[in-house]
Image: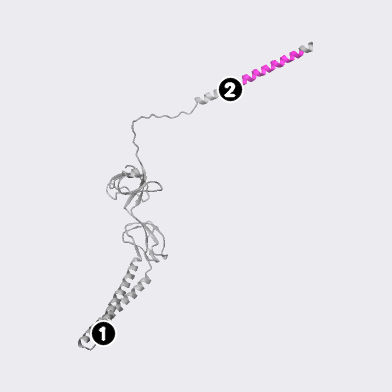
Amino acid sequence: MPSFQRSRGTFALSVAACAVMLVVIVISVSTFRSASANTQTQQVATATPVPVMSVLYTEAAEAESRFPALITARRESALGFPQGGQIRHLNVDVGDPVEEGQILASLDTRALEAQRQAAQADVAAARAEARLASVTLDRQRRLVAQGHVSEQVLDEVSARAEAAAARIEAASAVEAALSVQIELSALTAPYAGIVTARHFDDGASVGAGVPVLTLVEAGVLEVRAGLPAHDAARLNAGAAYRVELATGETILVRLRAATGVIDARDRSISVVFDMPEEGADAPQAQPPGFVPALTQL
């Protein structure tokens, strides 16, 4: 009996100890949850402020259309010789301004000049033969009138005189052709501009039509842009439109032409405007390749 009571006492103490431990665990969990809740509350309370702005409601709004454009020279030419040969002189370099008719480069023409001299000698010989044939023809006509020679002899002399005259024309044509070749051996500027590329140097051999220099027209610029079809349809040839340069300067340009053909790559229509060349509306110097914005249609 006493041992049974001791066992019951031990069991009661164990139960009491477990109850105390359970209470401690519950209190710890509650304390942890309370601390987490306080931390979250503090985080919410210290959130970064968001800037706000006031807006005014309107019934309608307007948006300005802006289209990128490109300033280009009206004319750009790849210049070459119509016949092949060796370059004797290149008189300009990249960046040099040139005037219309200025000689930019020349080929070696020594062989052509020798051939022209030979052609000139042929012309002189043909003329001498023609003079002799003319004198002989006059003499034979007198003899025929006197009855000393037949008409057949006169016809033969007359034919030789005509052949001599024809040889003069042939030799003169050869001389003229060689003179033209020599003239075309000098590459001249078709208009005033700036040299933007030089593809060969002195002494190089080039073929007919191979570009030697690239020339861009100076002072005459145009604006090119690609517009959606519905915007391009609103343009009128000769009308003025506004272009804003990257410098902030605004100028008026006039529509010269619109292709009317939609580009399959970007579904746009190319339009070309003429820039003012001089006067109050002329812009400050803008190089070809400068990108303005077409801002008003």
> Residue at point 52% right, 24% down?
42
Position of 65 with respect to 9 (left or right) is left
Secondary structure state at the residue bearing disc 1 = helix
Residue 197 in the image: state x and y as whole percent: 39, 57
Q: Is residue 135 above or below residue 183?
A: below
Estimate how packed mark 2 is, as few (under 14), some (14 to 19) or many (20 or more) residues with alpha carbons within 10 Å.
Answer: few
In which quadrant is the C terminus drawn? top left
Residue 129 in the image: state x and y as whole percent: 29, 80
Tell which of 44 and 122 is nearer to you: 122
Mark 2 — residue?
A: 33
Considering every residue shown, the one lying at the far left of the view is: 145
Per the rendered image, the range of residues in magenta is 6-31
Secondary structure state at the residue bearing disc 2 = helix
Mark 1 — residue?
A: 152
Instruction: Determine which of the numbered discs, if any, sits on residue 6 in the image.
Output: none
Q: Is residue 258 above or below residue 39?
A: below
How far is mark 1 from mark 2, CA to CA? 142 Å
